[in-house]
Image (cartoon, helix red, strand yellow):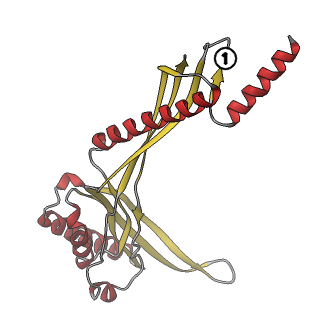
Amino acid sequence: MKRFLIILAVFGLFALTAGTAYAQEGGLNNTITVSGVGSASGEPDIAYIQVGAERTDRDLGAAFNATATTMRAVFDALTALGIAPEDIQTTSLNVYPQDRYGSDGQIIERQFQVSNVIQVTVRDITQIEAVVTTAVAQGANTVYNLSFGIDDSAALERQARLAAVADARARAEQLAAALGVTVGRPLIVIEIVGGSRPVLQYLGGGMAMAAMESMNSQPISGGQLSVSVSVQITFALE
């Protein structure tokens, strides 16, 4: 009896290391548990980008007013471009001092930096270049966190899910064949849905406005996005 238990324990350790569990007796009798992964790709249909204005001045009021004027112009220009007002959201408004200290540790100069950043949701990604160029032309001098997405990923998830189940069954059948048994019906299914999206960052902070205005439209490509589904399935063995 002791010898049987030792052999079963070693077999269970091997199965766990391989990422697959096979129960011959006890618990879930005559079952095998495997993982499967599936993915599906598609073109993005939505983009997100943050643009803003940042000013530094000894006069807090001057920096604050300049930033406010710029961002009003950016907002008006983007809505004129066709971006819906509800797709423009302020994400940060910061005011903080920048101090220069002397050798005695005392402040010898104080400037104020004011920044105002909005996030723009671009539902027609063919407009993304125009959005960036328009914002910069109106005085925006920070551009952050350009990313792409798929607004409705349900169709891709369905494709990925079918591929994950097929992958899990193929793994189970391969292992079952090696063990001399046959895969039966699924008993337990656990699903994990994940996604991936490429992120492109274009950082314009601190650039002189004259240099920014001389720039041509930036080439931007959304590429392909993928949705992945992982499943863990316990099959009966026959």
Q: Quadrant of residue 204?
A: bottom left
Quadrant for the N terminus in the image:
top right
Q: Looking at the picture, tell me which residue is in the foreground, 106 or 6.
A: 6
Residue labelled with disc 1: 24
- Using the rendered image of the protein, determine whether residue 187 is visible from the camera's viewpoint: no
Q: Amino acid at mark 1?
A: Gln
How many marks on residues? 1
Image vertical order of residue 63 relative to residue 223, above or below: below
Quarter of the image with the C terminus in it: top right
Q: In screen coordinates, is 235 left or right of 44?
A: right
**Point 48% across, 27% down: residue:** 190
Residue at the spot x=75%, y=27% of the render?
11
Q: Is residue 16 above or below residue 196?
A: above
Question: How packed is label 1: few (under 14 Cα within 10 Å), some, or many (20 or more)?
Answer: some
Instruction: Residue 114 in the image: state x and y as whole percent.
Output: 39, 69
Seen in the picture, residue 209 relative to 132 is either above or below; the reply is below
Helix, strand, or loop for circle 1? loop
The image quadrant that residue 31 belongs to is top right
Residue at image location 20% in from the left, 65% down from the top: 126
Q: Position of residue 205 (x, y in %)?
A: 41, 75
Q: Farthest residue toward the right? A: 2
Left or right, residue 103 beside residue 96: right
Residue 164 shows in this picture:
yes
In front of the other: 51 or 60: 51
Q: Is residue 169 above or below residue 200?
A: above
Q: Viewer-proximal residue, 28 or 3?
A: 3
